[in-house]
Image (cartoon, rainbow, N blue to C red):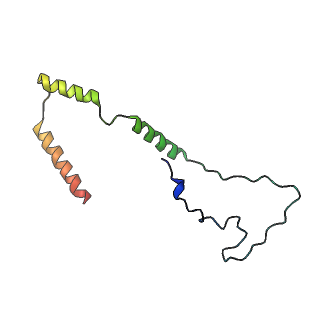
Amino acid sequence: MAIDIKQVNPHANSRIGSGTSTKGTPTQSAPTSASPTPQQGDSVSITSQAQQIQNVQTKMADMPDVDQNKINEIKAAIAEGRYKIDPEKLASNIANFENELKDLN
């Protein structure tokens, strides 16, 4: 899952390294040494769970929306008269679907 960093507020962390406290008064900084220390950049770590979610999303995006093989099998079964419909199961599934829709409201 991508994060849109264009929407990040650039002033949200303006206190960090600005040289002022939260009340707007200058803060005292520690005396600097003669040799400059290398600055460390920001880092982000992604949890293994987030990586798994990202992998699943990638796999799902690569999957076709329709299983064409399944469609072809059903078409062939209908054409050959092998496709049987269980009216009780169909009615039960329709009733369950309507109940799920009712629960969404």
At horizontal 41% and vertical 35% (from top left) the residue drawn is: 62
Residue 103 as seen in the image, left or right of residue 82:
right
Residue 59 as seen in the image, left or right of residue 95:
right
At horizontal 43% and vertical 41% (from top left) the residue drawn is: 57
Q: Nearer the viewer, residue 62 or 54?
A: 62
Which image quadrant is residue 101 in?
Answer: bottom left
At horizontal 54% and vertical 54% (from top left) the residue drawn is: 5
Residue 82 visible? The answer is no
Residue 30 on image: x %, y %: 81, 66
Figure disc tally: 0
Q: Nearer the viewer, residue 95 or 55?
A: 55
Residue 71 on image: x %, y %: 23, 30
Residue 19 on image: x %, y %: 73, 69
Residue 19 as seen in the image, left or right of residue 104:
right
Residue 44 on image: x %, y %: 61, 50
State which quarter of the image contains the C terminus: bottom left
Q: Nearer the viewer, residue 88 or 57?
A: 57
**Outermost right residue:** 34
Residue 9 visible? The answer is yes
Vertical position of residue 88 compared to residue 37: above or below: above
**Outermost top residue:** 80
At horizontal 60% and vertical 65% (from top left) the residue drawn is: 11
Which image quadrant is residue 31 in?
Answer: bottom right
Vertical position of residue 34 compared to residue 67: above or below: below
Q: Nearer the viewer, residue 62 or 85?
A: 62
**Outermost front residue:** 6
